[in-house]
Image (tube, grey):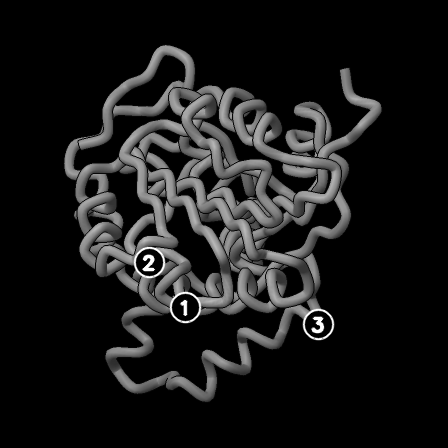
Amino acid sequence: MLKQSSDHGLIEVENYESNYMELPFENIMREYRKRNVIETLNNYTHSRFLEVGCGADPLFLEINDFDQMVVVEPGNLFYEMAKTNSNSNPNIVIVNNLIENIGDELIHGPFDFVVIGGFLHEIKRPDVVLQAVRKLCSKNTVVYSFVPNAKSFHRLLAYEMGIIENVYQKSGHDELFQRQKSYDSDSFNELLADNGFSVVESGSYFIKPFTHDQMNELLLKGIIDKTCLNGLGKMTKYFPEQGAEIYNISRIDDQFS
């Protein structure tokens, strides 16, 4: 269970972490999500790295070309998993807390590269997180953030089928995790800009034609396979705004006050 915070607005959800890991098709989405993060960070300096909200797959499992990595994870289960997987690497610091509660303790900043995990849509006050991250950035820091896409292919399809009244309507998974807001590319860019970040690049990844449950069923029945999934992973070149998740690459805005 994740605890409520008066500032962060973190929602209390019973068995959040175990429910998250058990989501059908989420293991597939994590793979393509990580691919996009890694492709991005390889274009930028990332020797001093901060990951806010590592979930079940901290990025140090995929990359090792850093001098210092700080991982901030409020969930107890994900924190313990990260601690175990770090193998006591002295270059990895893992903190079990909310980012806004420990800013003064992060003496390793400013960082070169920051990843904000896909949770900004789940909390009442994403501005609190973004302001805390901003304090740990220099003008050269690159911040990568991502959330589900309200205008993803499968939501648009559901709308045209008459299943949902609009693309911002909450899904069953949104209700389960008490997600607070659905973002499209414009509103996500606006969130970053309102909190002192200048968006350098934004986009989406992985065309998901159907819901998690339906995609998982197609895999189990052998109707689609890894080759098909890899093809769907490349389809955003044709449908750049309709990927399952949207991402932003930003830096702090020096003119923000």
* Mark 2 or mark 3, whichever is nearer to me: 2
Q: Give the Cα separation between the discs numbered 2 and 1.
A: 9 Å
Q: Is residue 237 left or right of residue 87?
A: right
Residue type, numbered disc 2 = Asp
Q: Is residue 27 left or right of residue 168?
A: left
Residue at which label 1 appears: 62
**Which residue: 41% across, 63% down?**
29
**Which comes before the other along the chain, label 2 or label 1?**
2
Whether 27 is drawn above or below 176: the answer is: below
Residue closer to the observer: 140 or 3: 140
Residue type, numbered disc 1 = Glu
Q: Give the Cα separation between the discs numbered 2 and 3.
A: 26 Å
**Which residue: 66% across, 47% down?**
142
Residue at which label 3 appears: 237
Q: Is residue 79 left or right of residue 244?
A: left
Q: Give the Cα separation between the discs numbered 3 and 1.
A: 25 Å
Quarter of the image for residue 174 reads top left
Residue at which label 2 appears: 57
The reply to whether dot 2 and dot 1 touch (C-beta < 8 Å) is: yes
Residue type, numbered disc 3 = Lys
